């Protein structure tokens, strides 16, 4: 056994709602960005990486903490604390893995062993290429203009973009949907 002491800059992507009575919900994604290198283009689709879960970022797990239920890419993600992975399953099929952090901790796995994780919630991502290269890994959840609860989950790295629609069950809308009533406007 060896000990490593690491200090790594981290970034955060956050969506938060506020009202007169407090915050009906928040989502936070915490990750360590990796600088883009052209050699990564050769790795995309390579036999070495295909069908293997990758840690999504550097060092410690990329973590998502959400106090609201989500639907990302048509897959339900209950409120909770998760570690995220990325997997390329076919030439143009990328999947975001959402793994219960408490279960991963019991397995005593560090993020560099992400390939050992069993399947979590698998979220299909739409892959596209861009001429504008993102210099380092960037992860965002953005709401659509004029919407309080719909948007996109987005990963950008180099010339690659991975996107999935996201719906956030927040506030009165969540309570109304759970009871089967008509949607309530905010």
Image: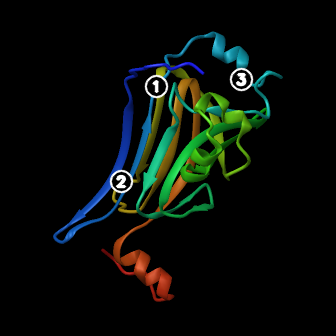
- Which numbered disc, 3 or 2, marks the residue that appears first in the sequence? 3
106 or 53: which is nearer to us?
A: 106
Camera-nearest label, 1 or 3: 1
Counting labels gives 3
Q: Residues within 10 Å of mark 1 (few under 14, many from 20)?
A: many
For image coordinates 38% across by 21% down, the residue present is 7
Q: Which residue is mark 3?
A: 44
Q: Which residue is mark 1?
A: 33
80 or 170: which is nearer to us?
A: 80
Place of residue 74 in the rendered image (x, y in percent of width and height, measured from the top left): 63, 60
Residue 165 visible: yes
Place of residue 82 in the rendered image (x, y in percent of width and height, measured from the top left): 53, 50
Place of residue 135 in the rendered image (x, y in percent of width and height, measured from the top left): 46, 18
Q: Is residue 145 above or below residue 161?
A: below
Q: Residues within 10 Å of mark 2 (few under 14, many from 20)?
A: few
The quarter in which the N terminus is drawn is: top right
Q: Residues within 10 Å of mark 3 (few under 14, many from 20)?
A: some
């Amino acid at each position: 056994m060896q000990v490593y002491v690491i200090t790594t800059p981290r970034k955060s992507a956050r969506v938060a709602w506020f009202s007169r009575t407090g915050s009906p919900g928040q989502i936070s994604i915490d990750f360590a960005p990796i600088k883009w290198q052209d050699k990564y283009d050769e790795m995309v689709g390579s036999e070495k990486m295909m069908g293997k879960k990758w840690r999504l970022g550097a060092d410690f797990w990329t973590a998502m903490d959400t106090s609201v239920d989500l639907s990302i890419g048509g897959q339900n993600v209950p409120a909770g604390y998760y570690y995220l992975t990325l997997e390329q399953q076919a030439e143009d099929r990328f999947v975001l893995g959402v793994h219960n952090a408490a279960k991963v901790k019991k397995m005593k796995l560090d993020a560099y062993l992400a390939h050992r994780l069993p399947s979590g919630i698998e979220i299909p991502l739409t892959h596209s290429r861009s001429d504008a290269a993102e210099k380092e890994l960037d992860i965002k959840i953005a709401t659509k203009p004029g919407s309080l609860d719909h948007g996109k989950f987005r990963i950008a790295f180099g010339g690659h973009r991975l996107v999935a629609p996201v719906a956030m069950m927040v506030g009165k809308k969540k309570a109304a949907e759970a009871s089967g009533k008509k949607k309530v406007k905010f």
